[in-house]
Amino acid sequence: MKFKLTSIAAAIILSPATFAADMEDIERLTVKGKYLSVNQSNSIKSPTPIIDVPQSLSIITAEEITARGITSIGQIIDYAPGVNTSQGEGHRDSVVFRGVRSTADFYLDGNRDDVQYYRALYNVEQVEILRGPNALLFGRGGTGGILNRVSKKAKTSDKFVNYNVSANTFGAYNLQLDTNVDTGDKSALRINAMYESLDNHRDFFYGDRYGFNPTARFELSDDTIVDVSYEYIDHERFIDRGVPTANGEPVEAFEEVVFGDPDNNYQTLGADVFRANVEHTFSDNLKGNFNAFYGDYDKVYSNFYAAGYNAETEQVTLDGYVDTTQRENMILSSNLVGEFETGSIGHTVIFGGEVINTKSNQDRYNPVFDSTDGDRETFNISRPLSFRGLTGTNAEGVTVTADFSDLNDDTHVDLDVYSFYVQDEIALSDNFDLVLGARFDSFDIEVFNADPEVLETRSRKDEEVSPRAGLVYKPQKNISIYASYSESFLPRSGEQYANINGDANALDPDTFTNQEIGIKWDFNDSMSFTAAIFENEQTSLDNDPNDPESFVEVDSDVSGFELQLQGYITDKWYITANYSNLDGENASGVELRELPENTMSVLTTYEVNEVFGFGIGATYQDESKVSTSASSPVLPSYTRVDASAYYTLSDKMRLQLNVENLTDTLYFPNAHSTHQVTVGAPINARLSLIGSF
């Protein structure tokens, strides 16, 4: 069966992964590709065609995730324009959105998902990446962009069992199950489950991940739909923070050395996440949505890492800490979407509100070495290091032990956020659309510092209005030219609300503005092109070094452009190509960290016949700085080549091969700091059996 999709749908379907789909599924994919998951919690919250959204964005569907053998957010980012990955200290997703690094601008069905962990994709319908500040719909943060996962929902009048079994050449393997059953004429139950055993190219690496996510749908009437969901998350993995640098770049000779404690570099996460969503159609022109989200997270993060390196003596200095986080997020949100006309002018108005309560307890303990009575010790570099189980032999040949006994901080956070927003998509004529909106946020945080030597409570309340404006001109139905302006902010308590000690208690939030112009062009029913030029500006207040009682503005600026070409060249030949050019510096004129000037990717697939197809891709990242300082080491540029092939065994079974780093290139994709640079994986292959009953 050959699929004829719209140009947008073609842009997000990598290969014939939906080989078992029926005609209803094809229509669903077409609508979803055109409207950014209409009728589900999504990034733009209204049924607006992508070509009419005055903003640069990317979408990847579950079908494409499967076809490319993707198991992580980072692998999605590799082939998306305007974004790149950061190390995240080896224990969390971390994305650089147009030069702004974030570990918290992640969303699940439009709900904030800010706990630091690696997100699984087994229960995802699609992933949406919106670039530029997004405060109007998402509130604080979202300063360079956001990443939203749309979850799979139960389907009435449908029954299926899908499975995906895969293993790679490192020894890792993954099992996924997706089953849906009718429980009545107007109700259904869907269960997504996964188990993943982790392994990779680095010594000592291990881990496993469990996920279990039942969802239920109840169609109470033709106008009211209720979705409820529970997800159990259990993750454990080894923490690897990479290798040190020397002479301004990573030390390639250490590509196989792990700078940590094999027994005390780990992360564990347990979480229970509940979601409920009610959609109600009041009339043909008015629809409403109410959403409740509760997440309970318990995380431990323990690690040692290279804090210093002496190239002359071939010695490394280790530092470390252990963190714990217990967080509860309660989010209640609702919105109304109404369509009406005033004379000849059409309106699509979104009015919404959100209430968030977050309780988060965090503590950190530093190690104490008995040899130094401090948190650092020096060791000779060897493979493995002479340090395991908090015991080892230091560079002087002395047996040393360490203990996580030095309390660094212990904070208890209570955060209340109240928001409401309104946006009007105004159809001025057949050719012009105007988007106007604003959001009000009240951000009230109280932090109790439980350190016995401090024992103080600090609080701060910020109230901010974030505007958005966009103009879309359509000279014809398949072309849109747009201009947009938006703002966002980030309170000084930061993404993880760790504290508001010192100056943070007195300083206003950082503010971000974005100006963007672009074009979206659907050449025909199978090929589309988008381009955007933008400028993001960040303004922060800091203490004046010459007058402690005064403040000065500290600004940074990122500008650039993005190009995307996606679609079918012929019925059998598909291609997606992306290019980004970024330029950013701070107020002192120093280039920003993790901001490669040029990134590009090309991915193409070809269907040889009805049962066999193959693909090849390449991603290039320019050199970038590890830190924002004039003397920062540099991550070298690299090109990685990937390949894939599939063979359809039957109507309901496919064998698939995905090969990463086909040319076995040594590369360093990202870093956390000077002596913590990630070593990219060598050539590795994943073999998958994908099918349905």
Image (cartoon, rainbow, N blue to C red):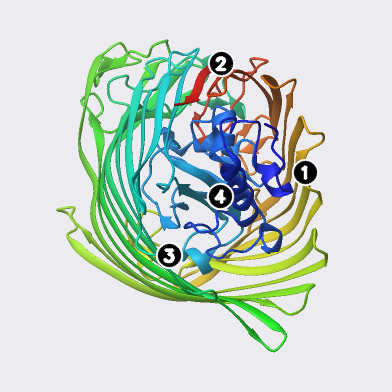
Towards the viewer: 532 or 364: 532
For the point 61% across and 28% down, the residue is 249
What residue sits right under mark 1 in the picture? 526
Q: Could you tell me how far apart the alpha carbons at marks 4 and 3 are, in whole angstroms?
A: 29 Å
The picture quadrant where one finds residue 539 is bottom right
Q: Nearer the viewer, mark 2 or mark 3?
A: 3
Which callout, 2 or 3, points at the residue further toward the start of the chain? 3
Q: Secondary structure at mark 2?
A: strand
Which callout, 4 or 1, points at the residue further toward the start of the chain? 4
123, above or below 463, in the image: above
Numbered badge on residue 685: 2
Look at the numbered discs 1 and 3 and tell me whether their residues touch, using CB distance below 8 Å: no
Which callout, 4 or 3, points at the residue further toward the start of the chain? 4
- Which amino acid type is marked by label 2? Ala
Residue 376 seen from this side: no
Numbered badge on residue 128: 4
Q: Secondary structure at mark 4?
A: strand
654, above or below 192, in the image: above
- Which amino acid type is marked by label 4? Glu
